[in-house]
Amino acid sequence: MKINLPYLIAFLALLIIEIIIALFVRDAIIRPYVGDVLVIILLYTFIRGIFQKPLKYLPVFLFIFALAVEIAQYYQIARLLNLQSNKIVSTIIGSTYDIKDIVCYLLGTVILIIWERLEKAKVPG
């Protein structure tokens, strides 16, 4: 395993942006929508930062993961596991299902697929 520094730097930058959004932004667009689009990209940059080789279908797998989390929210998994009072777990899992979140995750996935295709087009061969 070889570290991919540009992706790790991008991950750290996105993580800081996500934290700022979560702590300080109280609006109707950036917090609920842009943050959800960025979370897919955040996870992507983290994984690509750890693995040097591109992982085939990584954006799609991340979308499926995000979809699974959203489904868990729909079924109130935190409450079912009696973890709703745990602030950290509730924040990570989330507590509110919203179909718009899935649309945001899909948008993040599409952005990543386009990014990968543009990157692949740059590489000769």
Image (spheres, rainbow, N blue to C red):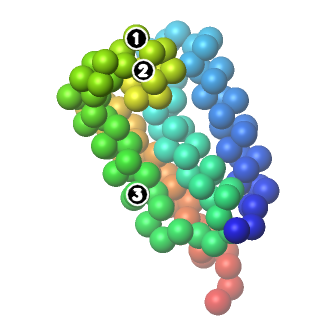
SS state under label 2: helix
Q: Residue at x 76, y 47 (%)?
A: 9
Q: Which mark is residue 85?
A: 1
The image shows residue 111 at horizontal and vertical percentages of 49, 52
Q: Earlier in the sequence, mark 3 or mark 1?
A: 3
Q: Residue at x 20, y 28 (%)?
A: 75
SS state under label 1: loop
Query: Mark 2 — residue?
Result: 90
Q: Which mark is residue 111?
A: none
The answer to whether any part of residue 57 appears in the image is yes
In this rendering, would 8 be left or right of 104? Answer: right
The amino acid type found where label 3 is placed reads: Phe
Residue 89, above or below 39: above
The amino acid type found where label 2 is placed reads: Ser
Residue 125, above or below 68: below
Work out which quarter of the rendered image holds the C terminus and state it: bottom right
Q: Earlier in the sequence, mark 2 or mark 1?
A: 1
**Which picture quadrant has residue 78?**
top left
Residue 22, above or below 64: above
In this rendering, would 99 be left or right of 56? Answer: left
Q: Outermost residue, left direction?
A: 75
The answer to whether any part of residue 110 appears in the image is no
Q: Nearer the viewer, residue 68 or 33?
A: 68
Q: Are marks 3 and 1 in contact (CB under 8 Å)?
A: no
The amino acid type found where label 1 is placed reads: Ser
The image shows residue 57 at horizontal and vertical percentages of 44, 66
Q: Outermost residue, front direction?
A: 82
Query: Mark 3 — residue?
Result: 61
Q: Earlier in the sequence, mark 2 or mark 3?
A: 3
